[in-house]
Image: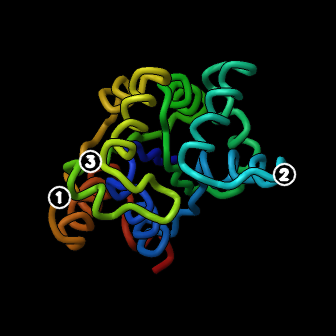
Amino acid sequence: MILGLTGPAQAGKSTAAKYLVDKYGFKELSLSEHVLDPILKERGEEVTKMARSKLGDELRKKEGMDALAKRLLALIDSPRIVISNFRSPEEVEFFMNKTPSFHLIMIDAKPEARFSRRSAIDPSTMEEFLKRDEVDTKNKGMGTVFEMADYHVDNNGKINQLYKQLDSIMDEIGISLEESGD
């Protein structure tokens, strides 16, 4: 089973992935961390959100819009995988076609909440922060990816509310704690 996570920057995808790893026994892979970051480091470039975005655009232009998904597929070595950071519809379609048990979960939060959660590699102004989402929506079809989601999670509340929504999704999909080895 492969679960895909999508959503705008700092909506809570990493927090959701960690919860699925810790509670349900998934292994986390990231289109950014496992595909893009090693290339950036090899090139001697700083790992930033914008550098990731530019490199992703470069690879998609050279190898097709599903380039990151194809590269990530080679890293899958577990029956339960959660993949964060889907940006293009072609990435989602690639996994839908390769894995009959693929489910896409959209994590969202209001811009103000997301900006307050920004990390050291995120832009420091709200304008720059939101520009990245705008670029991804326009250039990669991120809005279409959001529409493709099987499940939608509102992450504007407390963390336990996020967890309850994820538990409901796992229950609906048919993943139980007993199966995860807990």
Local packing at callout 2 (Cα closer than 10 Å; few below 14, some 14-19, many 20+) is: few
Up the image or down, 72 lies above or below 10; here it is above
Per the image, the residue denoted by label 3 is 108
Q: Quadrant of residue 170?
A: bottom left
Marks 3/2: CA distance? 32 Å
Q: Nearer the viewer, mark 1 or mark 2?
A: 2
Closer mark to the observer between disc 3 and disc 2:
2
**In the visual, does 171 lie left or right of 102?**
left
Q: CA distance from mark 3 to mark 1?
A: 8 Å
Q: Is residue 143 left or right of residue 159?
A: right
Q: Secondary structure at mark 3?
A: strand
Against 1, is 143 above or below?
Answer: above
Disc 3 to disc 1: CB gap under 8 Å? no
Residue depicted at 48% across the width and 21% down the height: 139
Residue pointed to by mark 2:
42
Residue at (68%, 28%) from the top-left corner?
67
The type of residue carrying mark 3 is: Asp
Q: Amino acid at mark 2?
A: Glu
The percent position of residue 32, horizontal first and vertical second, equals: 60, 48
Q: Residues within 10 Å of mark 1 (few under 14, many from 20)?
A: some
| Residue 9 at x, y percent in the picture | 39, 49
Q: Earlier in the sequence, mark 3 or mark 2?
A: 2
Spot occupied by residue 103 in the image (x, y as percentages of width and height): 41, 41
Secondary structure beneath label 1: loop
- Residue 82, horizontal then vertical, whole percent: 51, 54
Instruction: Identify the residue position indicated by label 1 in the image.
Output: 156
Question: In front: 152, or 46?
Answer: 46
Circle 3 crowding by C-alpha within 10 Å: few under 14, some 14–19, many from 20: many
Q: Secondary structure at mark 2?
A: helix
